Image (cartoon, rainbow, N blue to C red):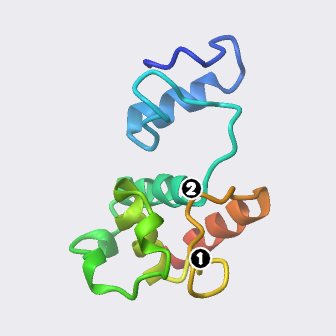
Amino acid sequence: MPFVDCDYESKYISYIAAAYELGITKGTSQSAFSPYDDISREQLATMLYRVIKLAEINSTYGFDANNVRKFYDDSKISDYAKESVYFMAEYGIVKGVDGAHFATLATATKEQAILISVRCADVF
């Protein structure tokens, strides 16, 4: 792993390494993972989407984010996250903060992370 900000003695390092090796996370930069930062809603959606793709769930094939209803704050969603966010929205896994805005950079709370993970399990 290229991350210089991780505690390689941590009991969590094997999970970070596995997620990195599988492509679930790429870190917050080429050399940072930012293990103590909060996770944004778009980061969470992206990592869960990568897990779904790794599981080779057929519904991910041929998904086109250009043909879905956009959130009003679409211009604030990072390019790397758009496909993930709109895939998750299309399947009802994420709904936005008010039905119209995704609030991409807002912190995903533990409760939201659990709810989104449970919805993934229910849908797929």
Alpha-carbon neighbours of circle 2 within 10 Å: few (<14), some, or many (≥20)? Answer: many
- The kind of residue on which mark 1 rests is Asp
Element under label 2? helix
Please tell me in which quadrant of the rendered image residue 55 appears: bottom left
Residue displayed at 46% across by 64% down: 76
Q: Nearer the viewer, mark 1 or mark 2?
A: 2
| Residue 25 horizontal/vertical position (percent) | 46, 40
Element under label 1? helix
| Residue 99 horizontal/vertical position (percent) | 61, 87
Alpha-carbon neighbours of circle 1 within 10 Å: few (<14), some, or many (≥20)? Answer: few
Residue, disc 1: 122
| Residue 33 horizontal/vertical position (percent) | 54, 29
Q: Nearer the viewer, residue 124 or 26?
A: 26
Residue, disc 2: 44
Tell me the CA gap for discs 1 and 2: 17 Å
Q: Is residue 23 left or right of residue 40?
A: left
Q: Is residue 73 left or right of residue 99?
A: left
> On screen, 39 above or below 102?
above
- The kind of residue on which mark 2 rests is Leu
